[in-house]
Image (cartoon, rainbow, N blue to C red):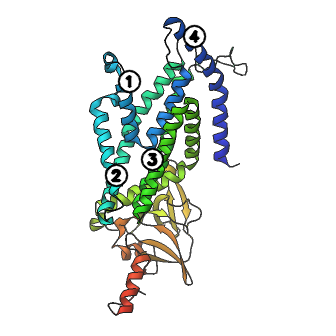
């Protein structure tokens, strides 16, 4: 069992031990109180918690659709006199435009199989940034949802967290931890599911086949449908399925985050034609780690530079904000590969080559300066560009690059 698995299991066990007894007692107390006072069939705290978990997971999978749908549902199912107390995302001025934008994206996806790639890919780039913006906007809906759950399961006479009398293993009253843990826990679930779901947009952007794009979009829509469908069948089943999705996404969050950063940097460089006004630095340059840098996870974003000892090193920060780490670039013969979209740093071993670093598209056209900064032995064409050069040479239209 690796460290991440042990940490996740410990957190899950802690949540079960602390939330389980308190949630049951709070649900029973609140249910009894609501029955005595009103006699109406109001949702129990446990049901509301299950609803919120399913809603947060659904919103994370598709932020604009999720927030718009939840806002519309709450607005339409709330008496008119109480609508002024609803959250901002239940305002028609938000959810109507949000659902209209979702409809435009769906229309683009429907026509994607017949649109030419040159027209569809720019739209995919715009949708990639739309998903990022809507993901940030939707974060503002997750916090009030989490607070609503805590207020529901912590009414007068009941407590979300067990007291020492209710939980014999507790040495202190943990009821104060509700406000402290509920919102971060909701944000952890939302962030993990969103970053994994966001990778679908990145894969669509780099995929050259419209059929693959349609399959990825269908998979995301199907996953969202299972969250809504399981919750419609039974709130507890929906919460269990949403929790399983969230747990899987927590384990995939690191991989998905690196892919999301990779897609964002590449999309921004391509969208702004940054290579036309960019010059590689003579000392250090930004790059993504490749398979040839085995000590670092693939697609980690960092800087490549020469250390004082003369060795080529790669410096990076996990999740872009944690403590900086340094990895040595494997010694050997290096060359810069000139690709059709972006260059690479290759380690040459006989007739084979291994990608050590991937440079963003902004470095396109600056391969010679990049080779000088990395102390590489030269520049060569790679990938589709090498194939095009070979065809030109074979047909007598040009000379293949050595």
Which x, y percent locates residue 76?
A: 35, 26
Q: Nearer the viewer, residue 209 or 23?
A: 209
Q: Earlier in the sequence, mark 4 or mark 3?
A: 4
Q: Earlier in the sequence, mark 1 or mark 2?
A: 1
Q: Nearer the viewer, residue 54 or 377?
A: 54
| Mark 4 surroundings within 10 Å by alpha-carbon count, few (fewer than 14), some (14 through 19), many (20 or more) | few
Foreground: disc 2 or disc 3: 3
Task: Mark yes or no: residue 262 visible.
Answer: no
In the rendered image, the residue lying farthest to the top is 36
> Compared with residue 28, is residue 47 higher up or lower down, i.e. above or below?
below
Q: Which mark is residue 221?
A: 3
Residue to which mark 1 is pinned? 77
Q: Earlier in the sequence, mark 1 or mark 3?
A: 1
* Rendered residue at 66%/39% (across/down): 9
Q: Quadrant of residue 137?
A: top left
Task: Mark yes or no: residue 267 visible.
Answer: yes
Q: Between marks 1 and 2, how big is the CA–CA gap?
A: 31 Å
Q: Which mark is residue 127?
A: 2
Q: Earlier in the sequence, mark 2 or mark 4?
A: 4
């Amino acid at each position: 069992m690796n460290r991440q698995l042990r940490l996740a299991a410990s957190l899950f066990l802690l949540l079960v031990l602390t939330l389980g007894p308190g949630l049951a007692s709070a649900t029973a107390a609140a249910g009894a109180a609501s029955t005595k006072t009103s006699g109406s069939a109001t949702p129990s705290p446990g049901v509301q918690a299950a609803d919120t978990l399913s809603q947060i997971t659904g919103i994370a999978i598709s932020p604009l659709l999720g927030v718009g749908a939840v806002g519309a549902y709450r607005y339409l199912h709330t008496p008119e006199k109480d609508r002024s107390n609803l959250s901002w995302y239940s305002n028609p001025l938000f959810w109507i435009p949000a659902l209209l934008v979702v409809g435009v994206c769906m229309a683009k996806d429907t026509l994607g199989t017949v649109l030419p790639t040159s027209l569809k890919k720019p739209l995919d780039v715009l949708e990639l940034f739309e998903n990022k913006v809507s993901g940030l906007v939707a974060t503002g809906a997750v916090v009030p949802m989490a607070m609503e759950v805590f207020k529901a399961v912590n009414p007068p006479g009941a407590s979300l967290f067990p007291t020492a009398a209710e939980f014999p293993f507790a040495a202190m009253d943990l009821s104060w931890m509700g406000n402290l843990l509920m919102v971060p826990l909701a944000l952890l679930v939302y962030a993990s599911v969103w970053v994994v779901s966001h990778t679908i947009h990145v894969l669509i952007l780099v995929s050259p086949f419209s059929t693959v794009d349609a399959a990825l979009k269908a998979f995301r829509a199907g996953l969202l449908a299972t969250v809504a469908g399981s919750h419609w069948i039974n709130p507890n089943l929906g919460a269990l399925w949403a929790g399983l999705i969230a747990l899987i996404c927590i384990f995939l969050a690191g991989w998905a985050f690196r892919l999301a950063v990779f897609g964002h940097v590449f999309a921004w460089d391509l969208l702004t034609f940054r290579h036309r006004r960019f010059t590689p630095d003579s000392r250090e340059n930004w790059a993504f780690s490749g398979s040839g840098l085995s000590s670092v996870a693939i697609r980690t974003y960092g800087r490549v530079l020469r250390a004082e000892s003369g060795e080529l090193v790669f410096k990076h920060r996990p999740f872009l904000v944690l403590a900086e780490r340094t990895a040595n670039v494997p010694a050997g013969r290096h060359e810069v590969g000139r690709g059709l979209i972006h260059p690479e740093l290759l380690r040459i071993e006989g007739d084979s080559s291994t990608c050590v670093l991937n440079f963003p598209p902004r470095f396109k056209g600056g391969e010679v300066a990049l080779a000088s900064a990395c102390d590489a032995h030269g520049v060569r064409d790679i990938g589709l560009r090498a194939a095009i050069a070979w065809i030109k040479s074979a047909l007598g239209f040009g000379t293949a690059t050595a």
